[in-house]
Image: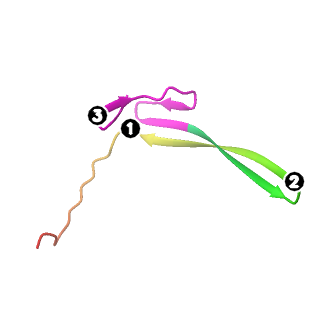
Amino acid sequence: MEEVRGMKFRVHSSDVEYTPSTIKATLPYYTTRVEGTNIFPSCEKFTICTQTKVPKLGVMLVGWGG
C-alpha cells in the first residue's frame, strides 16, 4: 500500500507491477505521422519505475538567518 497525505492506496491494473522496492507502470504513447496524404498511427510502450523508499536528504544552508 502506498500512502499519500495519510491515505493508503494501491492500483489494481495489469499495467502496474509492485515489488518490495519499486512500482513499475507500463504506459502506451500514441502518435501519428503524416506524409502527404498518408497517415501512420503508431504506439510506443514506456515503462516508468518508481522507488517506494524515500531516500534521506539533508540540506545545509550557510549564511541564511541574518
Tag 3: amino acid = Gly
Distance Cα–Cα, label 2 vs label 3: 51 Å
Return the residue at label 2: 38
Which of 20/4 is in front? 4
The front one of 46 and 39 is: 39
Label 2 vs 3, first from the N-terminus: 3
Identify the magenta region. 1-25
Q: Residue at x 57, y 27 (%)?
A: 14
Tell me if 16 is positioned left or right of 52 in this view. right
Relative to residue 55, is residue 65 depicted above or below?
Answer: below
Tell me the element at label 2.
strand
Which residue extends farthest right?
Answer: 37
Closer to the camera: disc 1 or disc 2? 2
Residue on which disc 1 sits: 52
The secondary structure type at the circle numbered 1 is loop
Residue 42 numbered tag: none
Whether 51 is drawn above or below 66: the answer is: above
Most foreground residue, 62 or 42: 42
Q: Label 2 crowding class (10 Å Cα cut-off): few <14, some 14-19, many 20+?
A: few
Residue shown at the point (87%, 60%) measured from the top left: 36
Q: In this rendering, would 43 be left or right of 21?
A: right
Task: Decide: few, some or many residues near mark 1? Use Cα within 10 Å; few <14, some 14-19, many ≥20.
Answer: some
- Residue under pointer 3: 6
The residue sitting at 81% across, 49% down in the picture is: 40
Residue 4 horizontal side relative to residue 45, left or right: left
Q: Residue 41 location in percent, x, y?
A: 77, 47
